[in-house]
Amino acid sequence: MWDPTTYLRYGDERSRPFHDLVARIPAERPRTVVDLGCGPGQLTATLAERWPASRVVGLDSSPEMIDRAAALDAPVDFAVADLRDWRPAGDEDVVVTNAALQWVPGHQALLRRWAVELPACAWLAMQVPGNFAAPSHLALREVAGRPAWRAELAPLLRADPVDDPADYAELLTGGGCTVDAWETTFVHLLPARPTADHPVLTWMEGTALRPVRAALDAASWSAFRAELGVRLAAAYPVRQGQVYFPFRRVFVVARTGDRAQENQ
Ligand SMILES: C[S@@+](CC[C@H](N)C(=O)[O-])C[C@H]1O[C@@H](n2cnc3c(N)ncnc32)[C@H](O)[C@@H]1O
């Protein structure tokens, strides 16, 4: 289950890659704009501001996220849907998926299918976190592998589910797209207060720790959290009241081919 309030605790930091991604889509008057895995919807609403004449759709598999999104009262059609089942209807000139595909094993096959099924000259823009080898995730896997938790958590621990930018570029170029792919490591400066939890722990509770929390009872979760907090404090020491949290992200903006020309 997703908790929109926990997820939005670092809303400013989490929104930055979305804006960097969308800035690279030069579409002027897209007919329909779709945000797959739209979460709490505040970023999807910015798509409606950018393209006020377009139909904007936000889809997410979490009812809690869609409830939060619908409460924004933005000019966006929000609905609960699994992005794996989504298929272009023919007028989606822009498709955005931000920080969602890392939750979808085998998403590379979806990207390839969308590249083929989207209309001619459409924009497909994605961003995924590329931080699965970061100290935060190494600490998570290390603590989850300890005897106290291994049985419950081993099935949940994902190997790196995302590719490098060059791999996505190759995949989508092979699907007939023109591709712009890059990576950025953001250094988030997270305030650390002496009486509060370590900020990287708080950050991870909004995303990567959700499945762990769901799998453990209250006592185990509390012990797990404490142990992970110790490791994170060592990996990300507090300096002058803040923590420097590097976060690598992978971006791809692909434009589908001009099918008329391709068919000549
Ligand atoms: C980290 S949040 C990102 C939300 C939003 N795109 C943003 O940038 O703030 C990941 C979202 O992906 C959604 N998600 C994960 N798997 C999904 C799937 N198979 N279909 C639709 N949404 C999915 C989750 O419910 C969650 O809201």
Image (cartoon, helix red, strand yellow):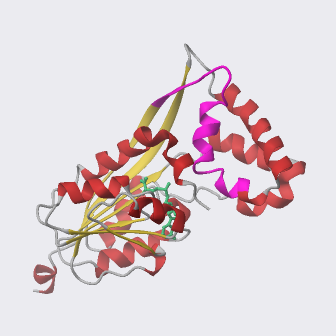
Quick check: 239 above or below 103? above
> Looking at the picture, how far across and down is residue 58, in whole percent?
36, 67
Q: Is residue 237 above or below residue 61?
A: above
Q: Is residue 62 visible?
A: no
Quarter placement of the C terminus: bottom left
Q: Is residue 61 visible?
A: yes
**Residue 167 sits inside the magenta stretch:** no
State which quadrant residue 122 falls in. bottom left
Rendered image quadrant of residue 51 = bottom left
Q: Residue furthest right?
A: 147
Which residue is the extreme one toward the top?
240
Report the residue at 33% width, 58% height from top: 44
Q: Looking at this rendering, what residue extends furthest in the bottom direction?
A: 263
> In the drawing, does residue 136 fall left or right of residue 38?
right
Residue 109, x across and y down, in percent: 45, 75
Left/right of residue 237 with respect to residue 55 in the rendered view:
right
Q: What span is colored magenta in the figure?
A: 188-213
